[in-house]
């Protein structure tokens, strides 16, 4: 028994010594190698505070900065030794703590992303887990506004993990959430996504939510698409359910627009506001409280999702008509009587909406 104890103590001492040596070696040599590789491949200056190794085997990079594009307080990478023995680069987990990405779109639409130089065939890397803690993405759009229009995702938390059994499974569970902020980092709303995706049979079950989003901040993007009148207030709530089976993806959407407040519009004498149902749907389809509830479904392919603008307009217009049909006859009569001149030109479009209405 004493001999076994001595052997165990000896093994622990050897492992501890190797761990200390590895930490020293990594701290002395690896930092320069990592910085040099980043700068050579990305053609961007890089800085790194230090590198450490934690037990049982995790390589940690502290205070990494890559130009003005990226920085993080810590990046922890856990390589899988069995994967290395099999000749593959397998990472059991990658964790990013307080990462920040600064994306910028120029006036020609290009992004400030570095172009990787491929020299030979790149090694295959297999990642089984990814975590992002308290991340931030700052998007500055110089195309929409030359001075730069900022949209920020703050408190970004992401966890993606591959299902471990069976080993051949391509199924992954994921969960992500973030706050949407304006340029002053004031909260505009929040987004979240959770569910699972199986790349094998191309199946999916997930839910995407947008909560209490102030839509007026995004006016430079949608312009007068939803209304000729300027919106002073509009709150968006969305719940989208993604279900895919054998690559056939159905997206069921519940879109709620509320707290609509318009800026006053002054028309010249004899002038009548014009209505385009594909662009000014809010002016007519909202209820008496200024709310618009749309329920619509989109069908596409999981491996190549595609929804055209015209298709989306038609789907949402159909949902808006359904929302209109659910309003009381009194509301409809009052709405039409208040805007009779405006809607004379669309009598044929309204005929189908009112058919069967008592």
Image (cartoon, rainbow, N blue to C red):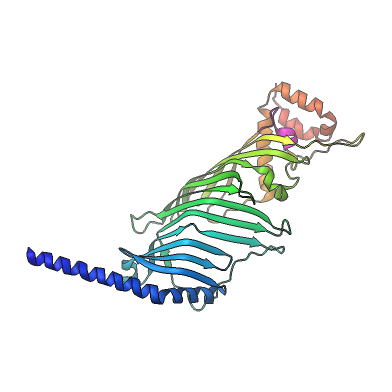
Relative to 218, residue 353 above or below? above
Q: Which of 241 and 282 is in front in this view?
A: 282
Image quarter for residue 356?
top right
The residue that appears at 79% across and 27% down in the rendered structure is 336
Relative to 274, residue 72 above or below? below
Q: Does the magenta stretch include residue 111?
A: no
**Percent x, y for residue 234?**
67, 38
Apparent side of residue 80 relative to residue 177 in the rendered image (left or right)? left
The residue that appears at 32% across and 68% down in the rendered structure is 81
Apparent side of residue 318 relative to residue 115 in the rendered image (left or right)? right
Q: Which corner quadrant holds the C terminus?
A: top right
Q: Which corner quadrant holds the N terminus?
A: bottom left
Number of numbered discs visible in the structure rendering: 0
Q: Which of 253 and 102 is in front in this view?
A: 102
**Percent x, y for residue 136?**
54, 55
Tell me which segment is drawn in magenta. 282-291
**Percent x, y for residue 56?**
30, 63
Apparent side of residue 186 relative to residue 51 in the rendered image (left or right)? right
Residue 243 in sight in this render: no
Q: Is residue 285 magenta?
A: yes
The residue that appears at 81% across and 29% down in the rendered structure is 339
Q: Is the magenta region chiefly helix, strand or loop?
A: loop
Apparent side of residue 269 relative to residue 65 in the rendered image (left or right)? right
**Percent x, y for residue 14?**
22, 71
Residue 112 in sight in this render: yes
Q: Residue furthest left?
A: 1
Q: Which residue lies furthest to the right in this view?
A: 269
Q: Nearer the viewer, residue 357 or 96?
A: 96
Image quarter for residue 53?
bottom left
């Amino acid at each position: 028994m004493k001999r076994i104890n001595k052997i165990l103590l000896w093994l622990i001492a050897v492992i501890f010594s190797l761990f200390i040596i590895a930490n020293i070696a990594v701290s002395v040599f690896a930092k320069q190698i990592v910085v040099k590789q980043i700068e050579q491949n990305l053609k961007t200056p890089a800085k790194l505070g230090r590198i450490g190794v934690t037990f049982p085997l995790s390589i940690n990079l502290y205070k990494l900065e890559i130009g003005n594009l990226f920085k993080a307080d810590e990046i922890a990478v856990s390589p899988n030794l069995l994967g290395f023995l099999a000749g593959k680069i397998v990472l059991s987990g990658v964790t990013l703590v307080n990462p920040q990405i600064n994306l910028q779109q120029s006036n020609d639409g290009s992004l400030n992303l570095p172009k990787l130089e491929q020299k030979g065939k790149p090694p295959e890397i297999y990642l089984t887990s990814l975590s992002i803690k308290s991340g931030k993405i700052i998007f500055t759009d110089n195309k929409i506004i030359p001075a730069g229009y900022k949209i920020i995702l703050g408190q970004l938390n992401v966890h993606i993990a591959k299902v471990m059994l069976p080993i051949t499974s391509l199924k992954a569970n994921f969960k992500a959430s973030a706050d949407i902020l304006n340029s002053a980092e004031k909260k505009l709303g929040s987004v979240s996504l959770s569910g699972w995706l199986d790349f094998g049979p191309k199946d999916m079950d997930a839910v995407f939510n947008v909560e209490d989003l102030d839509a007026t901040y995004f006016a430079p993007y949608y312009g007068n698409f939803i209304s000729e009148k300027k919106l002073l207030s509009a709150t968006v709530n969305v719940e989208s359910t993604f279900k895919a089976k054998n690559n056939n993806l159905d997206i069921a959407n519940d879109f709620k627009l509320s707290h609509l407040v318009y800026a006053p519009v002054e028309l010249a004498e004899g002038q009548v506001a014009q209505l385009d149902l594909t662009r000014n749907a809010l002016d007519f389809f909202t209820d008496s409280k200024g709310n618009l509830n749309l329920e619509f479904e989109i069908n596409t392919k999981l491996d190549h999702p595609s929804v055209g603008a015209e298709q989306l307009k038609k789907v949402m217009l159909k949902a808006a008509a359904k929302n209109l049909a659910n309003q009381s006859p009194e509301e409809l009569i009052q709405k039409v009587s208040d805007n009779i001149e405006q809607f004379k030109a669309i009598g044929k479009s309204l005929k189908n909406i009112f058919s069967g209405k008592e």
